[in-house]
Amino acid sequence: MSQPYTIVIGLETHVQLATASKLFCHCSTKFGAEPNTQTCPVCIGLPGSLPVMNRDALRLSLRTALALNCEIPEFTKWDRKQYYYPDLPKGYQISQFDLPMSHDGWVAIEDPQERFAPKKVGIIRAHLEEDAGKSIHDEVAGRGDSVIDLNRTGTPLLEIVSAPDMRSAAEVRAYLDELKLLLAYLGVSDCNMQEGSLRVDANVNLHIDVHGETIATPIVEIKNLNSFRAVERAIEYEAERQFREWQETHQRMGDAPKQTRGWDDAAGRTKAQRSKEESSDYRYFPDPDLVPVIFSREEVEQARQNLGELPQQLRERLQNELGLSHYDAGVLVNQGRAVLDFFLVAAHESGDAKAAANWMTQDIQRHLNQTGQSLSDLPLTPTALAELIKKLAAGELPSPRARDVFTSMIEYRESVDAAMQRLGIEAVDESELESLCRELLAANPQVVADLQAGKMKAIGALIGQARKRNPNADPNRIRELCASIVAAGPIG
């Protein structure tokens, strides 16, 4: 059933950049240190301290902005964003307002609910800013005490602001998955949501058609989203809540104030927090302690040339050059750079990209899931996998024994030849296999009659008998030989 409204969604994604030190000082950004042990006069805003820009943060931001197809202006500056929270010791945040370091880009996504139809989601801007600290609330004991940890204060963030182009929670999930994958391929962030390296705020409202007129509900910014699944659930809930509220009030809600709501994951609902601030509420002005940043065209072009192949380009190459399906290409690329590099070597050395993809997405992935290992822990090289594939293609390894060989290669860290020797697997002589097939056909006249009547499934009984006589016999070859012998005439 179609919804009586259109959901309009834009996201603000805060990405912690993978720098060793903070944006404007030398304090460490390492996660997990004792509270308030990674601070200095600069990041906690003591009088007289002066910030100095972290060039690595700027380099990673430029790399990301180019991958997001953003325009890079030659001139960008720093601004002070004024607000007063206990975890913001300076009383302002150094950010970028009217002249961000990038703007007007896009990300291509595929919505699984629309049969993977391609869609571009606009990027309004991606700008650098420093993080605030962290408020920790102790409500377990009933006292409601709060303490402040300033270790995160000053950590470099890239805020990526999407256009309100998404129309469903499924599209939002596709956007976030693609964005996270892109950031991982670029190596600009670990994107660990549990550690706060990737944080998402969702702006949601509805466009409701009333007798040909579109009525927009007030925009709600949803915070406290700690997982991609939470983002999906929150958007779905908020859309239904806004529609219920509109039905109950029957008011033109477009003039109502914007609102910030927090997501309660346990309760599965959003809760009102405050009215949403406008840019004027922050009283932006240029930071007097930091000089503007100038990007030269040469610097931008060099960064563009160093991007390498990005996920969408890699998917297209796997399909166009290696003949993989849309699904296989997506699975391999989405598993990350390490998996893709392993596959590319195995595919090249075996000469069979499809077989290499099957082993990567099925047996190897199953082994990693069962053992909890990463690909770097796997005692199997892509060259060894390629040798296994070539043995199969040449008929030297019966397909039913391939998984046994694969398991032995991993367990004993051995070559395919050593594994086959350990398991007693030998290539079966073609004449010997044909003789076995003729013998079995002669002993099973009913099977022969069934085959002559076109009942090809009857060969299954002979395959089982042949495997008992010779475990190394290839079932596919048995099927082919039996069919051709019967087709040739009387069994002699």
Image (cartoon, helix red, strand yellow):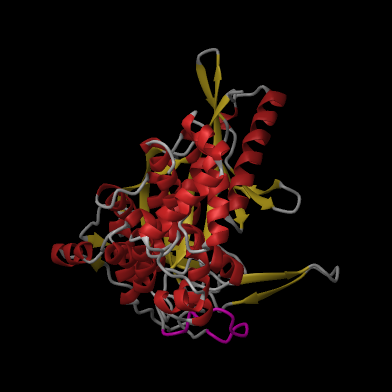
Instruction: Choose between 387 and 358: the one closer to the eye.
Output: 387
Q: Give the x, y percent position of residue 352.
A: 31, 57
Q: Horizontal placement of 275 versus 286: left or right?
A: right
Q: Horizontal placement of 314 versus 46: left or right?
A: left
Is residue 376 among what the camera can see?
no
Q: Residue at image x 55%, y 12%?
A: 211
Above or below for 418 versus 159: below
| 28 falls in the magenta region | yes
The C terminus is located in which quarter?
top left
Report the residue that reaches farthest toward the left. Answer: 298
Instruction: Choose between 97 and 74: the one closer to the eye.
Output: 74
Q: Residue at image x 51%, y 64%?
A: 403
Q: Give the x, y percent position of residue 323.
A: 30, 48
The N terminus is located in which quarter?
top right
Q: Give the x, y percent position of residue 356.
A: 38, 60
Above or below for 250 versus 333: above
Q: Quadrant of residue 184?
A: bottom left
Instruction: Choose between 176 and 149: the one closer to the eye.
Output: 176
Q: Horizontal placement of 324 versus 199: left or right?
A: left
Q: Magenta segment range? A: 26-38
